[in-house]
Image (cartoon, helix red, strand yellow):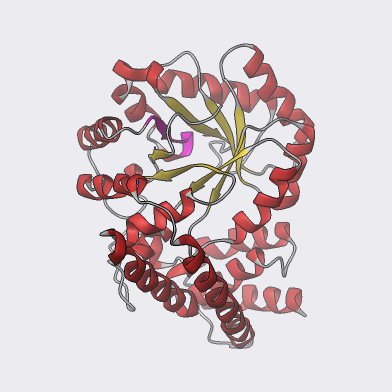
Amino acid sequence: MIPRSQLGYGCYALGGTYGKMVTPNQAKKLIHLAYDLGLRYFDTAAAYGTEEILGEAVKSFRHEITIATKIGFAASGKSTLSKAHILNSCEASLQRLQTNYIDLYQVHYDDPHTPVPEVVATLELLQQQGKIRGYGVCHLPLTKTTKYLEQGQPHTVLAEISPVALNRYRELHPLQRDHDFGIIAFSVTGRGLLTGKISSRPQFGPGDIRKIDPLFQRARLTSGLRIQAKLKEIGQDYSATPTQMAIAWVLSQPGITAALTGPTNPEHLRENCGALSIPGGWQKEFHHFLQTEHQHLQKIIAQEIRSLVANPQATGKDLLYVLEHCLEAELIPYLDGVAIFEQLIPNLNSPKNCTKVRLQLQNLLT
């Protein structure tokens, strides 16, 4: 199921993930504004707590748009993809969305205990029943994503892609030679890093997950600000903001079917939609800049990682920075990394837990 517009509205931030809560009425106005601006693709998830708001907001134009939602989380907080859970969750999502079909039903997170063929069979059953029109996958390791592509027929793969987050695109795009799927990008402005509103010492409000996000720490932050400055420089020739240039660049990449934007500020949403009118011709220069920047960043991060895992005073944020890089660069096994993440996050500020996690990472890296 291909999205009906290049740019889609993601409902993730409407749940307060970035610290700014919006009322249901404000959320509905944002969704209506997105529609008025030409967006015809809306993405949510059972885990976001925004399906009901989206369903209520789009009732009058439901059949003009593509609705995507996600499956995976159980009440326990663990990801489960058992047949019973998928079937029950689909029914619940249909009720919350006030619709009798879901355009794109996506596997949100991996369930290592349920074989891929079983998940595919359940999704295809829902497709045969007319309850979903297609399915896709999201935050899965590359090996598991490949299994879904080989053993099923996912229409899309949802992935974080921006000028400051290119690892997933570099993994996924080569797979498009052998498999028929589109890539849907999210966090295309680097979770706000490329907007020009983030300083070298960012201050985030209570509840904003960026307070611990590795992208806003150390060398990654410094690199991101250099990329933002380059986007600003190039954008001056097009009377475009860094935000618009970042979105336009993502949409120009081969294999990208659509990109999601999800600001809670109406003016930011209008600004983001302006990216669709930026002409081409500048991408080659920016691509060369990104290659040079990426090579430089990898050398600096390698030094940082060695220093942090050897430092007995490393904080929880430091170790999260190490862990994310190790997973992205496949320096440690994926399942080991997930287990360490689940151990680290609930006790991020515990010195005892940090020592334990640091030693685990040290052992995995030697």
- Asked which quadrant contains residue 269, the reply is top left
The vertical placement of 279 against 354, above or below, is above
Residue 353, image x, y percentages: 57, 72
Which residue is nearer to you in this view: 124 or 241? 241
Quadrant for residue 84, please give it. Answer: top right
Residue at 56% over, 16% down:
131
Q: Which corner quadrant holds the C terminus?
A: bottom right
For the image shown, how many numbered marks are present on the structure? 0
**Residue 331 drawn at (x, y percent):** 72, 70
| Residue 154 or residue 101, whichever sits in front | 154
Report the magenta residues as a range: 40-47
Examine the structure image and report whether residue 42 is included in the region drawn in magenta. yes
On the image, which quarter does residue 356 sit in? Answer: bottom right
Report whether residue 352 is seen: no
Q: Position of residue 57 (x, y in %)?
A: 29, 25
Q: Magenta span has 247?
A: no
Q: Nearer the viewer, residue 260 or 240?
A: 240
> Would residue 253 appear left or right of 85 to someone viewing this image?
left
Q: Position of residue 279 (x, y in %)?
A: 38, 51
Describe residue 148's horizontal placement relative to residue 261 as left or right: right
Residue 54 in view here: yes
Which residue: 60% across, 70% down? 325
User: Quadrant of the image for the N terminus?
Assistant: top right
